[in-house]
Each structure stands twice: as C-alpha cells, then as structure tokens.
C-alpha cells in the first residue's frame, strides 16, 4: 500500500492553495458578514478547472479523480467554507449525478456547461417535511405528453439564490414513498419557477441558501435523470459522493482554524513567554493535528474507493461522520487557544467555529451517517 499523492495531484493542490490564499481568503470575512454570493469566485475557480474536477475533459471537466477533488475542496474550505460548499455542490451534487445517470445526449448538453462553470448548479431534494426522511418528499411530477408538470417547494437549497440549473427530486406517486421518486435537470429560468430570498444562517453565510418553489412548471421528459421510480437511488448515490466533499470541507475548516491557532500560540505571550511554550497548548495542538490527519485519510480512503468503481456508501459516511465531528472539536480548541480574542470578530477562528457546525448537518446529519454505517456493518 502506498499513500502518496501523484505529481498531478500535488500540482493541483499547490495551485488551489495559492488561489485560496491570495484570492479567496482575503474576501472570506467580508462575504460571511454581508452574505453576498461570491459569483466572481465561482467563475475564477471554474477557470482553474474547479467546477468539475473529476468530470472527464470531453464533458467540460478537468478529468482528474476524486482525491484531486478532495484536495481542491480542502484548500478552498481552509480559506472560506462558503466558497468550499458552493464548489462541492456543483461538483458532487450536480455534475456527478448527470455523469452517472445521464444519457450521452444529456451529458453533452447539460453536463458540459456545468462542469466548465459556464453555469452554476444546485441540488433540490430537501422539503419542509422531508429532511433526514428524504423519501417523504411531496413535490409532484405529473406526466403530460412529452413533459412533466412539477408542483411543490424545496428548502435550504445551497447555491439556490444564483444557480442556473437544479437537480430536482419529485414524486409521481406519493403513496409509493421512495419508490415513486424521479429526478430531473431543471432550467431555473423556466416559467413557474420561483426562488426565495437569502437565508441568514449561523455559518457558511455566503452560500446562497434559499427556498425554491415550482408552480405548474413544465420540464421536458428528455430532462428526466434515470427512470421513473429511480429518483431515490439517484439521490442516495449522489449524496454518497457529496458526503466525501463535505468531509474534505470539514478537514479544510479544521486545518484553517488549526493554522490560525498555531500562529497565535507562537505570538501571544502570557506569563512572560509565548503560550506555545505551555504544555497545555502544545497538547491541544498535538491533538488537533492528529485528528485532522486521521480525518483526511478517511476522506481519501472514501475517495479512493469511489475511484475504484466500488460501492462506497460506508466509507463516505464514516469519513463525513468523523471529519465533521472532528471539525467541531478542532475549531473549539482553536478558539480556546485564542482566549477572549477568539470570541471576537477581529480573529478568524470564530468564523471557522461557526462554519464547522453545518458539516454535521447538511448532506445527512451525523445521526443519518450512523444509520448508514450501522446498516452496512451489520450486514457484515
Ligand atoms: N445508493 C443506491 N441505492 C441506495 C443507497 C445508496 N447509497 N442507499 C439506499 N439505497 C436504496 C436501498 O437499496 C433501497 O432500495 P430498494 O427500495 O430497492 O430496497 C432504497 O434505496 C431505500 O433505502 P433505505 O431503506 O435505506 O431508505 P430509508 O428511507 O431508510 O433512508 C437514509 C435511508 C439513509 C436515512 C436516507 O433517507 C438519507 O440519506 N437521508 C438523509 C438525506 C440527506 O442527506 N439530505 C441532504 C440534503 S442535500 C444537502 O444537504 C445539500 C446541501 O445543502 C449542501
């Protein structure tokens, strides 16, 4: 077994790190405070090939693998978690299902503009009454000739304020629960489509979270992703990949907070010496760096399993569960090392602390990850 990044992965990592530090980090605090969606960032990231890192070049992507994708999300999230999730959603939750479930014609027409960043995508599954219980959605799809007619509401949609395209999940038969679900690629300029305002949140405040509603919205049947009744599987398989991205995001947030805390500990003097000379602080830093590495390796293992073409639901859930919980502990310690200053807006740690929280909630709560893990380990 060899754990070493390939040359092209290292080059990508360095390139994204530079971009994150020079372009993304300087605006992170400002967009967190204003909530302004960083569309300029998305376009610049797309120019670097980050809108579809693991999408083959023939469909507008960079043709790299899932480990490379994780490296990119970690670097961006270490600078700005909002920017990290914007990219993660476009890559994992939008490009990936079209790549996996789309027909050749759909890949050519729909995937190319998304993977090249000409368009931005969002993933519309969650509804007011269907969060963890994703099979309980009530948005309906009724076949009418060559179209389907959609009616319903979605909530907490990342990128929703600015996306051009949405992967929308609906049901043709509410009674059939998850077996009635169907997925579509919906143009967000269609008549009958409405988006809500910007949702202010505890963290990742610039990620364009909003509500979406569909009123007699017509979608051509040619925009259906997979077959009728396959929507739940499309959603679950897509979220397996999404969870790897959120795991990488959690590693990035934790690393960002760790780096701030390490610098602070070396500069801040109390009792006549830098606080990094006290064993209490050293032990915090030791625990933090160990946990970040452990989470990163779990993330890479899930990414590697995906790239082998094997089922990776277990590995993705384990990575997301551990990384997101790790990010709470690490950002908490980073804030503690900063003392009273860490509690102010003057330092970045309070932002990392707030941003870490969502990684235990979106793309499946920690409790949902435990359900997935438990079912898998009990099957043996
Ligand atoms: N891949 C393929 N098929 C899968 C699958 C997977 N990963 N997981 C389940 N399935 C299949 C099962 O085999 C089963 O198939 P059959 O009907 O043929 O038997 C079917 O789907 C139903 O599976 P379950 O019985 O396991 O379904 P469940 O109702 O018990 O739900 C769950 C399981 C894990 C709780 C699931 O509902 C879940 O993951 N919920 C969380 C939803 C979620 O993550 N939402 C995030 C929203 S998006 C978001 O957050 C984006 C953002 O903002 C950034």
Image (cartoon, rainbow, N blue to C red):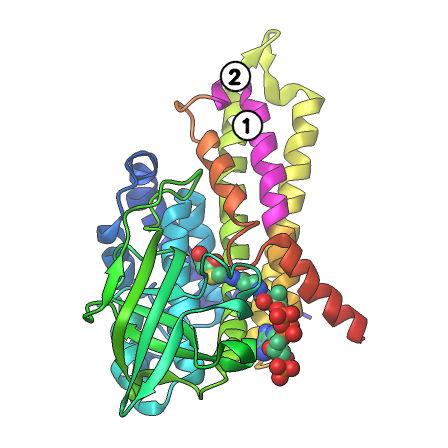
Residue at image point 56% right, 68% down:
303
Q: How far across and down, in percent of the image, does residue 184 sit?
A: 36, 78
Q: Splitting the image into 4 quarters, where does residue 52 fall?
A: bottom left
Q: Kindly report the secondary structure that dominates the magenta region of the rendered protein.
A: helix
The residue stretch that appears in magenta: 324-343
* Image side of residue 207 versus residue 376, left or right: left
Q: Is residue 265 left or right of residue 17?
A: right
Residue 330 is one of the magenta-drawn residues: yes
Which percent across, then down, holds residue 63? 38, 76
Q: Is residue 55 visible?
A: no
At 43% from the left and 31% from the top, the residue drawn is 348
**Closest to the observer, 4 or 152:** 152
Q: Which image quarter holds the C terminus?
A: bottom right
**Residue nearest the viewer, comparing 38 with 67:** 38
Task: Please tell me whether mark 2 sits on a helix, a strand or a loop.
Answer: helix
172 over 238 or under it: above or below:
below
Q: Nearer the viewer, residue 347 or 107?
A: 107
Q: Is residue 355 magenta?
A: no
Residue 66 relative to residue 22: left or right? right
Asked which secondary structure carries label 1, the reply is: helix
CB of mark 1 within 8 Å of CB of mark 2?
no
Q: Is residue 42 visible?
A: yes
Using the image, determine if residue 143 lies above or below residue 86. Answer: below
Q: Quadrant of the N terminus?
A: bottom right
Residue that carries the numbered disc 2 in the rendered image = 340
Question: Which of the numbered marks, if any, corresponds to residue 145?
Answer: none
Residue position marked by numbered label 1 in the rendering: 335
Residue at 68% over, 38% down:
287
Locate residue 236, reporting x and y percent. 54, 72
Task: Give the Cα distance between marks 1 and 2.
Answer: 8 Å
Percent x, y for residue 114? 29, 71
Q: Is residue 261 above or below residue 355?
A: above
């Amino acid at each position: 077994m060899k754990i070493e990044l390939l040359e092209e992965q290292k080059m990508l990592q360095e390139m994204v790190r530079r971009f994150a530090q020079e372009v993304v980090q300087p605006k992170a605090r400002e967009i967190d405070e204003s909530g302004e969606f960083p569309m300029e960032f998305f376009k610049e990231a797309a120019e670097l090939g980050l809108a579809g890192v693991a999408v083959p070049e023939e469909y507008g992507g960079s043709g790299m693998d899932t480990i490379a994708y994780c490296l990119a999300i970690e670097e961006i999230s270490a600078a700005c978690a909002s920017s990290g999730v914007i990219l993660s959603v476009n890559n994992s939750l939008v490009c990936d299902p079209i790549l996996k479930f789309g027909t050749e014609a759909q890949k050519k027409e729909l995937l190319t503009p998304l993977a090249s960043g000409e368009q931005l995508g969002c993933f519309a599954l969650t509804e007011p009454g269907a969060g963890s219980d994703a099979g309980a959605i009530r948005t309906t799809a009724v076949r009418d000739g060559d179209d389907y007619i959609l009616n319903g509401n979605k909530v907490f949609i990342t990128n929703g304020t600015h996306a051009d395209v949405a992967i929308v999940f609906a049901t043709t038969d509410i009674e059939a629960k998850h077996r009635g679900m169907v997925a579509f690629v919906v143009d967000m300029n269609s008549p009958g489509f409405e988006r809500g305002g910007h949702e202010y949140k505890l963290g990742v405040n610039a990620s364009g979270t909003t509500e979406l509603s569909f009123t007699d919205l017509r979608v051509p049947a040619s925009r259906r992703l997979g077959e009728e009744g396959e929507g739940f599987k499309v959603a679950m398989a897509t979220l397996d990949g999404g969870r790897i991205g959120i795991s990488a995001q959690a590693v990035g947030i934790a690393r960002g907070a760790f780096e701030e805390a390490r610098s602070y500990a070396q500069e801040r003097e109390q009792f006549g010496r830098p606080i990094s000379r006290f064993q209490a602080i050293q032990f915090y830093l030791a625990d933090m760096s160990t946990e970040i590495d452990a989470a990163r390796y779990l993330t890479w293992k899930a990414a590697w399993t995906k790239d082998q073409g094997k089922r990776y639901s277990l590995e993705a859930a384990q990575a997301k569960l551990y990384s997101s919980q790790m990010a709470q502990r690490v950002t908490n310690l980073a804030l503690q090392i900063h003392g009273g200053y860490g509690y102010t807006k003057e330092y970045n740690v309070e932002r990392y602390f707030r941003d870490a929280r969502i990684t235990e909630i979106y793309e499946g709560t920690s409790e949902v990850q435990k359900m997935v893990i438990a079912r898998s380990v009990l099957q043996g």
